[in-house]
Amino acid sequence: MAAAHCFRPLHPPPPGGGATAFASSSSSSSLLLRWASGERLSPLIPTASPLHHRRERKGKKGALRNEVGAIRPHRAVTAVRSLQSQGREVEAAPNALSSFWKWAVENGATAQAVKLAAVPEGLGLVAQRDLSRNEVVVEVPKRLWISPETVVADPELGRLCSGLRPWVSVALFLLREKARGVESSWKPYLDILPPSTNSPLFWSEQELSELQGTQLLSTVFGVKDFLRSEFLKVEEDILLPYKRVFPSPITFEDFVWAFGILRSRTFSGLSGENLILTPVADLVNHSPKITSKDSAWEIKGKGLFSREEIFSLRTTVPVKAGEQVYIQYDLGKSNAELALDYGFIEKTLDRDSYTLTLEIPESEAFLDDKLDIAESNGLGETAYFDIYLNQALPPLMLPYLRLIALEGSDSFLLEALFRNSVWGHLELPVSYQNEELICRVIRDACRSAMSAYQTTIEEDEAIREAGSLDQRLEIAVWIREGEKKVLKQIDMIFEEREQELGGLEYYQERRLKDLGLVGEEGEIIFWESK
Ligand SMILES: C[S@@+](CC[C@H](N)C(=O)[O-])C[C@H]1O[C@@H](n2cnc3c(N)ncnc32)[C@H](O)[C@@H]1O
């Protein structure tokens, strides 16, 4: 199977490349569904990804005693000959770790009771003593951050990169510094960065083929396509014309690497202009066991009189000596998002999701009215609904579906007279015909999406249970199994609904009850004179 021979557009076809839209079999219907996930993720991609649970704003929490001792380089030097990165042995210069710690300390980084060490996740931070919750473990002064400000202050890149998206300018900074080799003052940091992660952005065609039929695959194609167009722009405007600044060629793969580094190493809430790489703090790994919503980081002033900002990383749970300090990267991310951003998944079912994309077709006779109603309720011509395993459907989904499916004799609800009350009506079944249509279209779409996968849920389970999977294959199997389970769940919800259609109460019946013309059991009420 060659799934990845080309990148798909930002609006990718549905999983497996089948038909994009599903018109209902009713010839009069214009209900249109589009199934894809890439569309929503991709336009947001330029902002580097959140790494950890969001703190409302970059907080300057006033002066804080610098209570941490300097990192002593010798503490960091564990016997690491090669860094194990995501199951792959990555050759690292023997002294890379110690050089990195020495460099970080010389530039003002401090750490409390943690050492840098090789861990199953690559590199990580290991507690040197018992740590309580909320203890500061790493502090990184601003001069060690790599941010859009760093680029602006750069004598060569500052001018060249003005006007670029913040993440693109930081990516170019990383690539320029990498190319400078020993000339770069950032070399010790660049030397410990992994050459890739297990994000599907770095997978081979053969590895990607294991994702056949998945939304994640569509998203990967969409992101790659987006990255390619960004790369072609910077190549034309900066890389080729300014050979003096970029003497050696920068490839698309280099650009994807820089993007992957930003995506996997920036903390939640630090995106756009606030995007920063924070060497040392960015070595902290994620644990699914940490479910605390407490933020692990803040930005504050260093010392009582210093104005310099520092990035401060804390524990969010107690940690025993010798154990790794972990944080929760983002409670709100699905497994597909975790895979794309960081190259791992959580083996918990509540991260499995499927994004349902619904669209009011442009050909729709009542497009303006439907759009007006959707917009008044915080939705648009296209709406995305993340559906999670074992969770109820998003509350706005059914009203939106009923709105798209309104036609024929139900169209009176679109009249201006109903504008203030129509959403309330759409929250409940409108008519047998309307409700049946949405059930049929959703179930058809589920079946069509399911047919695009090359394995069944049972086959994936068997593959997983057989064990000893390569990490990337394990991600692929988990993702495709999870998506199918969610699709099956959606199908079952609408199957049950289909069976209930005859017993549901519809708009006209509710209206007659409101007018007192029909009783609770549907019986006609007569007014008889005594
Ligand atoms: C912010 S960096 C953490 C430092 C990283 N381990 C290193 O060696 O540079 C995030 C990356 O660490 C790895 N990582 C973090 N938590 C992980 C986990 N729970 N399972 C697998 N990999 C993890 C992933 O490669 C992820 O992209």
Image (cartoon, rainbow, N blue to C red):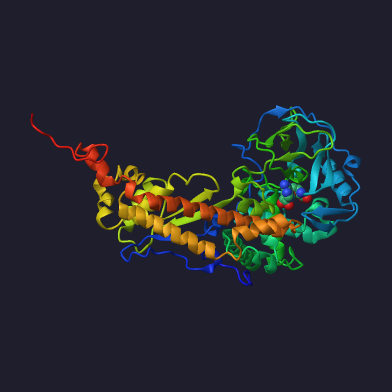
Q: Is residue 418 left or right of residue 221?
A: left
Residue 92 can be seen in this image: yes
Question: Which residue is found at the position 39% from the left and 55% from the top?
Answer: 438
Q: Quadrant of residue 452?
A: bottom right
Q: Nearer the viewer, residue 510 or 292?
A: 510
Question: Where is residue 523 drawn, in percent x and y?
Answer: 22, 40
Q: Nearer the viewer, residue 40 or 403?
A: 403
Q: Quadrant of residue 458?
A: bottom right
Question: Which residue is found at the position 59% from the left and 61% from the top?
Answer: 456
Question: Which residue is found at the position 25% from the left and 55% from the top?
Answer: 409
Residue 371 can be seen in this image: no
Question: Which residue is found at the position 25% from the left and 44% from the top?
Answer: 509
Give the quadrant of the N terminus.
Answer: bottom right
Question: Where is residue 359 drawn, in percent x and y?
Answer: 42, 58
Whether residue 138 is situated above or below residue 252 in the rendered picture = above
Whether residue 321 is situated above or below residue 52 in the rendered picture = above
Q: Nearer the viewer, residue 503 or 433?
A: 503
Q: Is residue 496 left or right of residue 468?
A: left
Furthest-left residue in this view: 529
Q: Nearer the viewer, residue 62 or 409?
A: 409
Whether residue 384 is situated above or below residue 12 in the rendered picture = above
